[in-house]
């Protein structure tokens, strides 16, 4: 639901990058991204430096 709300305001992205959290790598989420034609890119597991932008946003 949050993605759809964001899409209605910001438009549908071509790609999205997330960490490897269970909610992002779940089959249901992958199917959602595929349905919307969004390329899903995940970071390197257990590598905060590989996720620098995401970690910076989260302030971790």
Image: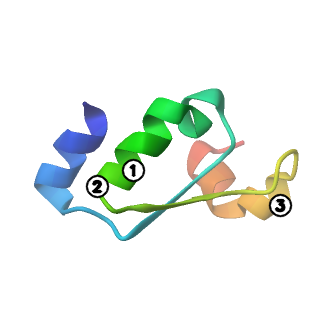
Answer few, some or many: residues within 10 Å of disc 1's Cα (few below 14, many 20 plus, some between 14 and 19): some
Work out which quarter of the rendered image holds the C terminus and state it: top right
Q: Residue furthest right?
A: 46
Q: Which mark is residue 12?
A: none
* Secondary element type, mark 3: helix
Residue at the image point whose x is 36% and y is 71% from the top:
14
Looking at the picture, does residue 48 appear above or below residue 13?
above
Residue at the image point whose x is 83% and y is 48% from the top:
45
Labels 1 and 2 touching (C-beta < 8 A): yes
Image coordinates for residue 3, horizontal then vertical, percent:
29, 42
Q: Which mark is residue 49?
A: 3
Along the line of sight, which residue is nearer the eye, 46 or 37?
A: 37
Looking at the rendered structure, the number of numbered marks drawn on it comes to 3
Q: Which residue is mark 1?
A: 33
Along the line of sight, which residue is nearer the eye, 24 or 55?
A: 24
Image coordinates for residue 52, horizontal then vertical, percent:
72, 61
* Secondary element type, mark 2: loop
CA–CA distance between discs 3 and 1?
Answer: 25 Å
Residue at the image point whose x is 23% and y is 47% from the top:
6
Decide if residue 29 is on the left or right side of residue 13: right
Mark in the foreground, 2 or 3 = 2
Q: Which residue is mark 2?
A: 36
Residue at the image point whose x is 31% and y is 51% from the top:
35
Decide if residue 38 is on the left or right side of residue 30: left
Q: Which quadrant of the figure has residue 11?
A: bottom left
Work out which quarter of the rendered image holds the N terminus and state it: top left
Mark in the foreground, 3 or 1 = 1
Answer few, some or many: residues within 10 Å of disc 3's Cα (few below 14, many 20 plus, some between 14 and 19): few
């Amino acid at each position: 639901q949050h993605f759809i709300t964001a899409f209605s305001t910001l438009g549908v992205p071509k790609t999205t990058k997330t960490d490897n959290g269970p909610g992002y790598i779940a089959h249901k989420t992958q199917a959602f991204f595929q349905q919307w034609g969004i390329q899903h890119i995940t970071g390197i597991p257990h590598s905060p430096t590989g996720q620098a932008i995401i970690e910076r946003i989260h302030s971790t």
